[in-house]
Image: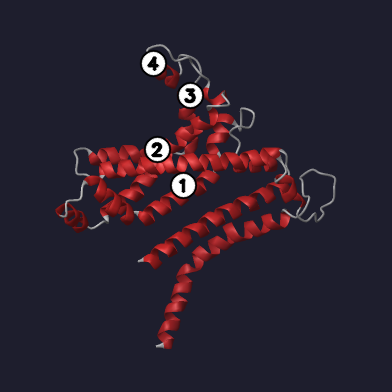
Amino acid sequence: MKQRFGDQTGVGLLLAAPALLGLMLFVLLPFLLALLLAFTNLRLGSPLPLEYVGLEQFRRIFTDPAFLHALGNNLLFAAIVVPLQTALALGLALLLNHRLKGTALFRTLFFMPVVFPMSLVAVVWVLIYAPGPDGMLNAFLNQLSFGYWQPRDFLRDEQLALPAIMLLSIWQGAGFQMVILLAGLQAIPGELFEAAALDGAGRWQRFRHITLPQLRNPLIFVMLFTTILAFRLFDQVQIMTRGGPDNVTTTVMYETVQALFTRQEVARASAMTVVFFLLVLIVTLLQRWLLRQEREVK
């Protein structure tokens, strides 16, 4: 029995070896290197010798208004996009879970933005947000308001630039969440709804007491996965606004890329990367804790 268990363990480790090797090469080692460089003063092209500076880089980034503003933008982006995108995806999943004509076509259309590269999607939305009366969105809002809408430059307006990126992100990512939630809906036993209907439960009661509890794990997954993506916000900012106007759309990833590739501040960028990694790690641990609480309740 022990020999058989040992054989199974060896086979399991052998099968997991490629994934473990990939994690070590592309996750663990880069993080350790970034952690090591974050305690130095390394800057490409600098005449200063490489020195150990301790927590100085972390002190600098957490006293830098630009980085704190970028972190606040990430938090604001996640606080708005995650619930709105999840609600939209849940509504689409509930709609497409019914047997209607053309359901397969609508599923394809709603999921299609997820397939397209974000760079392509961002360029298309730059055209949609084009300033002036000939811009697609400006022209649509002008028709909708019967000529009362004044054309706006969405991506250069300090009040509209970040909401414009939020709208794009909600539209682009809702299809992925929809697929996950639709799979969760189809896994709910139909007998639960039939029994509830026989007991006189209405649609809202069935949704509240059956659908939502059964979708708890998929909802936790999509919300926390989207939160991680919210902290990785970069492509839209780089293509559409470049952090402007006046840094109202800058993010942690954008600040990190600018520090590394524009200013060549390797140590500073490494410190930002470590902070970003820890934020993602906290979100992941939160997900594991919530799922563990669900298992204990059951």
Q: Residue at x 49, y 32 (%)?
A: 122
Q: Residues within 10 Å of mark 2 (few under 14, many from 20)?
A: some
What amino acid type should be assigned to the residue bearing mark 2? Pro
| Percent x, y of residue 200 | 17, 51
Q: Earlier in the sequence, mark 4 or mark 3?
A: 3
Give above or below for 125 relative to 103.
Answer: above
Query: Gap in Å between the C-alphas at discs 1 and 2?
Result: 15 Å
Q: Which mark is residue 145?
A: 4
Task: In the displayed orientation, state which residue is furthest to the top.
Answer: 147
The label nearer to you, 2 versus 4, is 4
Q: Which residue is mark 1?
A: 226
Name which quarter of the figure residue 216 lies in.
Answer: bottom left
Q: In the rendered structure, which amino acid carries the disc numbered 3? A: Tyr
Q: Is residue 102 left or right of residue 44?
A: left
Q: Of tags 1 and 3, which is closer to the observer?
A: 1
Secondary structure at badge 4 equals: loop
> The residue tagged with tag 3: helix, strand or loop?
loop
Q: Secondary structure at mark 1?
A: helix
